[in-house]
Image (spheres, rainbow, N blue to C red):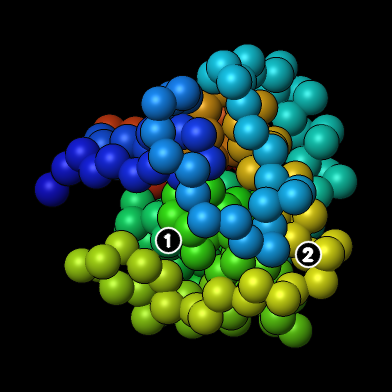
Amino acid sequence: MNKACFFNISGWISIVSLGLTFFLSSSAIAATPQSAFDHIEHSFDLPPKALPIQIIVQKLRHEDTFLVGNRGPELTAFMDPNCIWCHRFYEKAMPLVRAGKLHLRVALVGFLKPTSAAKAAAILAAKNPAQALAFDESHFNVITEEGGIRPDYQAPLAIRRAVSDNTQLLAETGEEATPTLLYYTKAKRWHLQHGLGLLGLHNILATIA
């Protein structure tokens, strides 16, 4: 069931609707509480302008990401640990990952809720980020729309900066929306989409290389 939810985060109004989460700029909303992440988080006065997809691909190679699974064509997913639509995407993707039909690269971002960045940092700082993500998703509270991992507000600066850089790169795709998916197609072109779309993973599996 689709629904619209509004959040007030770092100068943005977030709208959750139609299978993804995105932010709109606002100058008339209250400030969020400061955290250990405040000094490295990015803010935007205007909606970000999308970079060319080839630039996104090149920049992604230098970001802190991790792989889930070990076989199949690679699909990159920008995910927020507190994103209900990312959770639903993960549940649909994991049977394909286990079957070797999909290789998932995760770029964790943190913008949806005040705990998002610290939860993303907790996952990235783990010895096995894929297992930490699995814990977050298996303990996801669908009522409160909260991932299950404990936020790490004392994560190393390099980890916190990695979350911030991933979030910045997500915004440079044109929308600060999750999940955002990136993959190379059989037509030898990069494809980027915000949300799963109407056909979901079935369409992606039919076209991913």
Q: Amino acid at mark 2?
A: Ile
Whole-number angstrom distance, CA of label 1 to CA of label 2: 18 Å
**Is residue 129 in view?**
no
Verify CB contact (< 8 Å) between mark 1 and mark 2. no
Position of residue 171 relative to residue 80, above or below, is above
Foreground residue among 37 and 147: 37
The residue depicted at 74 percent of the width and 61 percent of the height is 160
Image quadrant where residue 21 sits:
top left
Rendered-image quadrant of the C terminus: top right
Task: Provide the residue designation for mark 1.
Answer: 82
The residue depicted at 54 percent of the width and 19 percent of the height is 47
Name the secondary structure under disc 1. Answer: loop
Task: Provide the residue designation for mark 2.
Answer: 159
Q: Amino acid at mark 1?
A: Asn
Foreground residue among 100 and 50: 50
Position of residue 175 relative to residue 107, above or below, is above
Position of residue 194 relative to residue 130, above or below, is above
Position of residue 178 relative to residue 103, above or below, is above
**Is residue 148 in view?**
yes
Q: Position of residue 205 (x, y in %)?
A: 46, 44
Q: Residues within 10 Å of mark 2 (few under 14, many from 20)?
A: some
Q: Position of residue 80 (x, y in %)?
A: 50, 55
Direction from residue 111 to residue 23 in the image, left or right: left
Foreground residue among 62 and 3: 3
Foreground residue among 40 and 2: 40
Q: Position of residue 168 (x, y in %)?
A: 69, 37
Q: Farthest residue toward the left?
A: 1
Q: Position of residue 145 (x, y in %)?
A: 30, 63
